[in-house]
């Protein structure tokens, strides 16, 4: 018997420049998009502060420091 929890396969389009930078960081830190997605979903559902921060984050330009 397997103890693995059911998983849902999904596909999303993300900004190419963000994803390219993310892949580089993943290699450096031994992290994955799967881990990010699972943790982000968990925090979004359990943390009002995280939900507000994600909802209010408008600027997605890595070259802009604001």
Image (tube, rainbow, N blue to C red):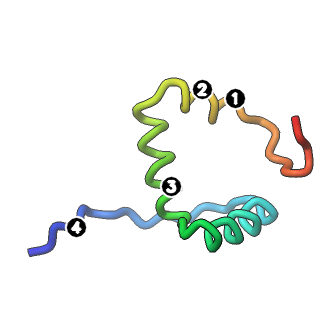
Q: Which quarter of the figure has residue 13?
A: bottom right
Which of these two is toward me, 26 or 58? 26
Q: Distance between the residues labelled 3 and 2?
A: 17 Å
Q: How far apart are marks 1 and 4 (CA)?
A: 34 Å
Q: At 24% across and 62% down in the image, what residue appears?
A: 5
Q: Is residue 3 above or below residue 55?
A: below
Q: How far apart are marks 1 and 3 (CA)?
A: 18 Å
- Residue tagged by mark 2? 52
State if disc 2 and disc 1 touch (CB < 8 Å).
yes
Q: Position of residue 45 (x, y in %)?
A: 42, 35
Which of these two is toward me, 57 or 10? 57
Mark 1 closeness class: few <14, some 14–19, many ≥20 residues within 10 Å: few
- Residue tagged by mark 1? 56
Q: At 38% across and 62% down in the image, what residue appears?
A: 8
Q: Is residue 37 above or below residue 60?
A: below
Q: At 63% across and 73% down in the image, what residue appears?
A: 27
Give the position of the N terminus as an image quadrant. bottom left
Q: Which quarter of the figure has residue 65?
A: top right
Q: How far apart are marks 1 and 2 (CA)?
A: 6 Å
Drawn side of residue 63 relative to residue 29, left or right: right
**Which secondary structure lies at badge 2?**
helix
- Residue tagged by mark 4? 4
**Which secondary structure lies at badge 4?**
loop
**Which secondary structure lies at badge 3?**
helix
Q: Is residue 52 above or below residue 7?
A: above
- Residue tagged by mark 3? 37
Mark toward the start of the polypeptide (1 vs 3): 3
């Amino acid at each position: 018997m397997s103890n693995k929890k059911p998983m849902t396969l999904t596909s999303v389009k993300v900004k190419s420049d963000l994803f390219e930078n993310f892949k580089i960081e993943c290699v450096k830190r031994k992290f994955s998009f799967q881990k990010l997605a699972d943790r982000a979903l968990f925090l979004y559902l359990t943390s009002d502060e995280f939900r507000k921060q994600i909802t209010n984050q408008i600027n997605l330009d890595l070259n802009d420091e604001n």
